[in-house]
Amino acid sequence: MRRRPSVLSLLLLTSVFACSGSSDDSLAPDSETGGSPGIGGALPAGGSSSGGAIASGGQVTGSGGFLSGGTGGNPQAVGGSPASSGGTLSGAGGSPVPGGAGGGPPSDGGTSSGGSATGGTGGEAQDGCPFQGKITYTLARAANPTNDEQEAYERITAALDKALSIYNCYTQIEKHINAQYNPSVPTADGNPNGSIRFGSRASMNFVTAMHEISHVLGVGADGAYDPLIVDGVYTGPIATARLRELTGDETAEIHGDGQHFWPYGLNYESEYKSEQDGIFHCYIVTAIRQDIGWD
């Protein structure tokens, strides 16, 4: 059973992810978002994926756009309509970030017609985003996709664009991801070598994408992350301090199993109960990268 600290209500008025919520304490770490995706799977670090899912043909490159601030404490839904200006965001150390004017939904990653297409740059922060992350991705596509492949590409593109609109707003991480559709993968898996494979339709959502992006960014990395898990407790001082700062609980702990962490690891789609869960996920992943020396 996971024990999760209670989360103090935070006033996050400019962000599109600005409510409160926490994960279900009954969730176990061995079954991730959208089923049971895992880090790596058959994909060894530094290696290439099995099954040859990266077929010849065009590519879609993108990183998602940005979502901006909400009004008076009523955040817009992720990927929803533009929000009006106003409000402040309590960021790291409690420093408020001014609310910005409006902004549209995240980039759709572009469209492709037998070639390549480019989505958002990921490097330009819009109003309401406290950071300017530069995480981008390339989605491998078959030259002549089947109906099944085309539908998968559309779902994966939407999931990654939305996930990166959050990551690039709430982190300053620079990374390129190679994504692919591989039906042999039971759900989805992300690997520190920079790849993410999506298999099942259930895994093709932005919460799963955020979880797998965290693996690409170092969560679960052999020899770096796993030594910090001692008796089920994450011992990295920077991420632990960050969690306590975010929750206001000086005894809060991050728990883990060597590949995952909770709370805010988004190990299940159901763990994303509010926009705050996505924001805290980004902040803790950033702190974990500092603990393992990746940032």
Image: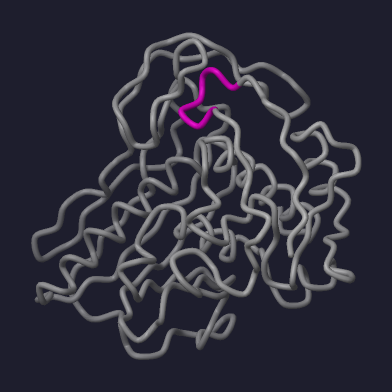
| Location of residue 261 in the rendering, given as x and y in whole percent from the top left corner | 70, 61
Residue placed at 65% from the left, 60% from the top?
26
Task: Give above or below for 131 relative to 157.
Answer: above
Magenta region: 12-18
Between 156 and 139, the residue placed more toward the observer is 156
Looking at the rendered structure, the number of numbered marks drawn on it comes to 0
Check residue 16 for magenta coloring. yes
When asked about the image quadrant of residue 126, the answer is top left
Residue placed at 85% from the left, 56% from the top?
236
| Location of residue 291 in the rendering, given as x and y in whole percent from the top left corner | 81, 55
Residue placed at 79% from the left, 54% from the top?
254
Task: Give above or below for 267 relative to 52.
Answer: above
Between 286 and 200, the residue placed more toward the observer is 200
Check residue 45 for magenta coloring. no
Residue placed at 50% from the left, 74% from the top?
37
Image quarter (top left, top right, bottom left or bottom right) of the N terminus: bottom right
Magenta stretch, overall SS: loop
Between 131 and 1, the residue placed more toward the observer is 1
| Location of residue 123 in the rendering, given as x and y in whole percent from the top left corner | 45, 39
**Image side of residue 221 versus residue 31, left or right:** right
Task: Give above or below for 173 relative to 202.
Answer: above
| Location of residue 124 in the rendering, given as x and y in whole percent from the top left corner | 44, 32
**Image side of residue 234 versus residue 277, left or right:** right
When asked about the image quadrant of residue 252, the answer is top right
When asked about the image quadrant of residue 277, the answer is top right
